[in-house]
């Protein structure tokens, strides 16, 4: 799997809902909107006002560069997404009928879902949204609009537009799943993303296998920034670059990156911004590697950012990067914890339960910090990671190091919004587990993310000649499993006490219990009845929890307990649970280091995919009574440049007063270079 940024250790609500029920620390209004299975929140950007004017200008320019890429992700997620979004927005903003009618309310809900998913598929389950308004209502509203309000292709009529879009929106069999991971199917032909066209999985794999040189010790991230298509019977890559695919958006991104380059904090930052610009202008993945090296080595800049084709979870083969951006600055005080961890990276590597031949002899350049997110965009918006680790190229990580971050103001927003929701009381086995989570989970959750991102993804090595893509469709799940296991194993280690990061050797139990509860039971709230687990992070957590349960059965390490007609989980032996995590970590690292596809496939299919329908139905019923949205995301703050009479920026103001609908409509109006 060639990707550049790995998002999330344990995403979203079930990670953060197990918090204490104290009163919120401020009057800041975190809650913005609620629809379907989603809650939209705000996040604060503490410390922005204390930055220098130059740093504020840098963030402002990087913010503008981030917002210009929104259309790219919509199009990558599905070939009709941009036209559908434009059409829905035209109906919404021009609607003159009864806005309290059931049809309009259902239409509005669907539009909000499309905005949140950056297309017509759910951001997490990858299933197509099911509209609750009728095809007749849609057709009637579209045909009532003036021609100039519609995104019509040349010579196309409103009737033809409706005929094109209606099956895509309403027929459940058409483009049913954005990313299909079902074993035994052609994952390219059955996935609705727009990363490939007119081509089979076999042809894709054959194309890239032919390009790869097994002797190349510094391979590029093949296919990361291209669409693979078949033209006149020939397989062709269409690169994303200025003057190429998505060129109009990329040129605007480059414009703002050049502005940012002018106010860079130092020469190192200026160098990697310039190299990123060169990559966007050429599409050359060797240049991208050069940028990645410079970026990873810049550990002195306070302001930082990601901007590019990064995540590969949207590709069933884990190769092509989705466009995203995250602008941030270092939280100096909170970074003490992650810096301690990264300074001891070699100790953690040397003492892991992994076979010595799969360990790095020398851990290079592991840097870690806690950051404050300033803007989220692309595949980081509205749903966002809570931790990041990059670059993803194994050889860059080995030779030049990696950079890891924990996004604390996002986790704080999750925690604040989740206070008092009753989750612990409904699902925890007893007051012992509740008290432990109330007391320690806020810290151990952050530590789990730190260890996952700072060390887990940077640990281990591939044996010489092993293809980084050898695990194919299972690569994402197994990589997240490896990083989670590394974090879980070391959460219980006395080294964290010795370093002063934790003050109680029992604290790790809060995270262990939450993790097992989530992996075996509560994350099933995100799965529809009768369906398998498909998302990589969910598969990763289920794999770990199910494997630990089954391999610890003889010692009764984890136990299902029935009480008052409800199912609960009890961990009877935390020390043995840690041993199980260590054993599985050793096997997952072996699989990755050797590129053992068959063993990796067997683990995922046996432990990570199938759902017990009885437990599932019970969990859904109990969870529904809590009235908690299983998914959360964010609106961004607004940054406004203050200028003098000569147009010079004298300050940058930040505001938090925009609602979800207004933000989405503004972004479509002001940041849509591919739809104008």
Image (cartoon, rainbow, N blue to C red):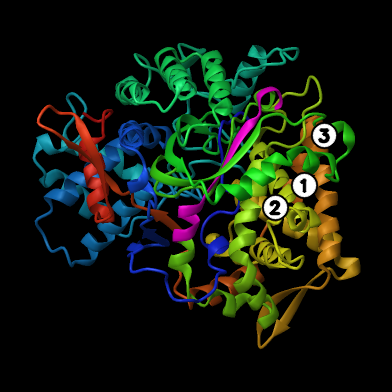
Question: Are discs 1 and 2 less than 8 Å apart at CB?
Answer: yes
Residue placed under numbered mark 3 in the picture: 359
Determine whether 195 is above or below 602 in the image. above
Q: Residue at x 40, y 47 (%)?
A: 117
Can you tell which of label 1 and label 3 is closer to the viewer? 3
**Residue 603 disc label:** 1
Of the pair 473 and 595, the residue shown nearer to us:
595
Residue at the extreme right? 554
**Residue 608 disc label:** 2
Q: Position of residue 65 (x, y in %)?
A: 33, 30
Q: Sequence order check: which comes first, mark 1 or mark 3?
A: 3
Q: Which residues are magenta?
A: 398-413
Of the pair 71 and 92, the residue shown nearer to us:
71
Q: Position of residue 91 (x, y in %)?
A: 18, 48
User: Does any portion of residue 609 appear in the rendered image?
Assistant: no
**Left or right for 136, reference 247:** left
Quadrant of the rendered structure where residue 561 is? bottom right
Q: Position of residue 245 (x, y in %)?
A: 38, 20
* Position of the C terminus by quadrant: top left
């Amino acid at each position: 799997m060639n990707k550049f940024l790995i998002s999330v250790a344990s995403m979203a609500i079930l990670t953060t809902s197990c918090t204490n029920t104290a009163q919120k620390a401020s009057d800041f209004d975190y809650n913005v909107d609620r629809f379907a299975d989603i809650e939209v929140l705000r996040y604060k950007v503490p410390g922005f006002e204390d930055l220098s004017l130059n740093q504020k200008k840098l963030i402002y320019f990087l913010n503008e560069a981030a917002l210009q890429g929104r259309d790219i992700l919509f199009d990558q997620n599905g070939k009709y997404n941009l036209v559908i979004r434009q059409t829905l927005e035209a109906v919404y903003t021009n609607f003159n009928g009864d806005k309290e009618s059931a049809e309009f309310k259902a239409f509005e809900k669907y539009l909000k879902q499309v905005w949140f998913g950056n297309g017509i598929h759910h951001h997490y389950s990858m299933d197509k949204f099911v509209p609750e308004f009728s095809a007749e209502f849609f057709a009637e509203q579209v045909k009532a609009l003036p021609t100039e309000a519609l995104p019509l292709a040349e010579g196309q009529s409103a009737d033809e537009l409706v005929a094109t879009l209606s099956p895509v929106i309403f027929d459940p069999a058409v483009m049913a799943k954005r990313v299909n991971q079902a074993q035994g199917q052609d994952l390219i032909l059955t996935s609705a993303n727009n990363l490939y066209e007119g081509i089979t999985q076999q042809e894709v794999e054959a194309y890239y296998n032919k390009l790869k040189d097994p002797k190349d010790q510094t391979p590029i991230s093949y296919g990361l920034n291209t669409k693979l298509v078949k033209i006149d019977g020939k397989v062709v890559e269409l690169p994303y670059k200025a003057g190429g695919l998505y060129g109009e958006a990329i040129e605007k991104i480059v414009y703002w990156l050049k502005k940012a380059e002018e106010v860079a904090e130092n020469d190192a930052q200026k160098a990697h911004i310039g190299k990123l610009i060169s990559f966007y202008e050429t599409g050359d993945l060797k240049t991208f590697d050069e940028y990645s090296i410079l970026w990873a080595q810049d550990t002195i800049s306070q302001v930082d950012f990601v901007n590019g084709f990064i995540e590969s979870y949207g590709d069933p083969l884990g190769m092509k990067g989705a466009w995203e951006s995250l602008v941030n600055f270092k939280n100096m005080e909170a970074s003490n914890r992650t810096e301690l961890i990264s300074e001891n990276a070699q100790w953690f590597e040397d003492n892991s339960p992994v076979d010595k031949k799969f360990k790095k002899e020398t851990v290079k350049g592991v840097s870690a910090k806690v950051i404050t997110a300033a803007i989220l965009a692309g595949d980081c918006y509205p749903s966002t990671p809570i931790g990041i680790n990059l670059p993803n190229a194994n050889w860059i990580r080995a030779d030049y190091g990696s950079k890891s971050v924990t996004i604390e103001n996002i986790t704080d927003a999750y925690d604040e919004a989740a206070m008092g929701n009753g989750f612990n009381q409904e699902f925890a086995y007893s007051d012992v587990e509740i008290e432990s989570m109330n007391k320690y989970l806020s810290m151990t959750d952050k530590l789990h993310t730190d260890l996952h991102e700072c060390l887990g993804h940077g640990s281990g090595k591939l044996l010489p000649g092993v293809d980084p893509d050898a695990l194919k469709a299972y690569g994402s799940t197994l990589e997240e499993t490896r990083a989670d296991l590394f974090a879980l194993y070391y959460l219980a280690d006395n080294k964290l006490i010795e370093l002063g990061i934790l003050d109680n050797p029992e604290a790790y139990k809060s995270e262990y219990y939450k993790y097992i509860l989530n992996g075996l039971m509560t994350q099933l709230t995100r799965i529809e009845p009768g369906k398998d687990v498909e998302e990589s992070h969910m598969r990763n957590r289920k794999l770990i929890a199910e494997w630990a349960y089954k391999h610890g059965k003889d010692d009764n390490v984890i136990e299902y307990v029935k009480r008052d007609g409800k199912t609960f989980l009890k961990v009877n032996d935390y020390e043995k649970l840690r041993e199980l995590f260590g054993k599985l970590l050793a096997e997952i690292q072996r699989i990755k280091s050797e590129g053992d596809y068959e063993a990796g496939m067997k683990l995922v299919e046996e432990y990570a995919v199938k759902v017990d329908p009885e437990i599932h139905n019970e969990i859904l019923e109990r969870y529904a009574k809590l009235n908690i949205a299983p998914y959360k995301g964010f609106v961004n703050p607004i940054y406004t440049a203050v200028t003098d009479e000569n147009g010079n920026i004298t300050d940058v103001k930040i505001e938090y007063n925009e609602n979800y609908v207004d933000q989405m409509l503004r972004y479509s109006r002001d940041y849509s270079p591919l739809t104008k």
